[in-house]
Amino acid sequence: MSIPVLSVVGVDFVRDGRAILDHIDLEVERGQHWALIGANGAGKSTLLSLLGAVQHPTRGTVEVLGKRLGRVDLRELRTLIGHVNPRHSLMNPLTARQVVLTGGTGGTELPMRWSPSAAELARADYLLELLGMGALTEARWPNLSQGERGRTLIARALQSDPHVLLLDEPSTGLDIAAREQLLDRIDQLREQHPDLASVLVTHHLEELPASTTHAMLLRDGKVVAQGAADEVLTTALVSETLDYPVTITRTEGRWAVRTRRDPARERRDDALAGEQSVAQA
Ligand SMILES: Nc1ncnc2c1ncn2[C@@H]1O[C@H](COP(=O)(O)OP(=O)(O)OP(=O)(O)O)[C@@H](O)[C@H]1O
């Protein structure tokens, strides 16, 4: 059996006496594309930061391709992981191509007196093309739209040829066209790199690419359910996770969420509104 790309065993993350993550187990294999779903504050970004070797767990183990966080140099681990941070900040107005090249140098700016090899340049251009940025390789970061920046950052995360891609709410702030373009590119990327694994965090099931294979539902730092996407992204389990009645549908691979009507609750709300207006009269 091959070594999992990511292996999380018995992980707790405790801050100020509070369990922000409570006994998390997760195994991500090559070619699997996980969605991490939960309400605000459920612990999604914290879990992603452990997977990205940004922080250490309080208890338990995190391994990336069998290399254990805490035992292996963090820089070595991070070359195996492509982490897309939507809050990427830049001091200099680099071009899209230069931003992608920084993905191979481990910083956000290009090192002084550094010049890329022909292979590094060719990879950056290949990735920009793959993410639909081929016409904008010379465009400068401050002039890129939010959607173009997002796609550039995914190309940047892939420059070091990582085994796993971590995406933290990649569609936040995008209009519908930009979001759909991004999701299409993620689907294409996964198709063309069948060994790549990924973990994508979102609040919104509409923002999941059709190529999502697995899901984990988190509530208050605990796992509500995890496994194959269609077994986990169900009306009952997502409602339990969000503590709110929703109906989940999946059409042409994509998910949609609607508030579930609860006739008993509506009758109670109507009766309450009636009592209040009588009281005010
Ligand atoms: N280093 C820390 N110290 C103290 N509390 C923290 C720390 N990191 C995270 N938290 C808290 O842990 C909880 C989970 O945070 P996290 O950002 O992981 O949630 P999330 O599911 O990503 O939320 P959101 O969807 O709002 O981004 C929050 O209540 C947050 O305030």
Image (tube, rainbow, N blue to C red):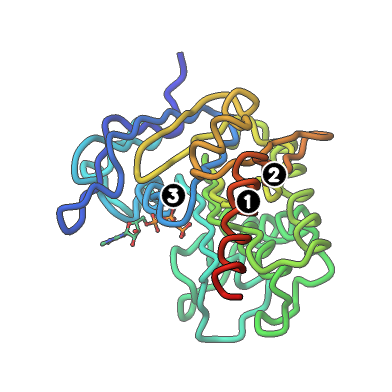
Mark 3 secondary-structure assignment: helix
Report ligand 1 position as a quadrant: bottom left
In whole angstroms, how far apart are the C-alphas of marks 2 and 1? 8 Å
- Which numbered disc covers residue 257? 2
Amino acid beneath label 2: Val
Q: Nearer the viewer, residue 43 or 194?
A: 43
Q: Quadrant of the C terminus?
A: bottom right
Point 75% across, 71% down: residue? 137
Mark 2 / mark 3, whichever is N-terminal: 3
On screen, residue 52 versus residue 189, left or right, reads left
Q: Are marks 2 and 1 in contact (CB under 8 Å)?
A: yes
On whether ligand 1 comes within 8 Å of the CB at mark 3, the answer is yes
Q: Is residue 53 above or below residue 61?
A: below
Point 84% across, 69% down: residue? 135
- Which numbered disc covers residue 204? 1
Residue beneath label 3, please? 44
Q: Is residue 93 above or below residue 127?
A: below
Q: Is residue 133 above or below residue 143?
A: above
Comparing marks 2 and 3, which lies closer to the viewer?
2
Comparing marks 2 and 1, which lies closer to the viewer?
2
Mark 2 secondary-structure assignment: strand
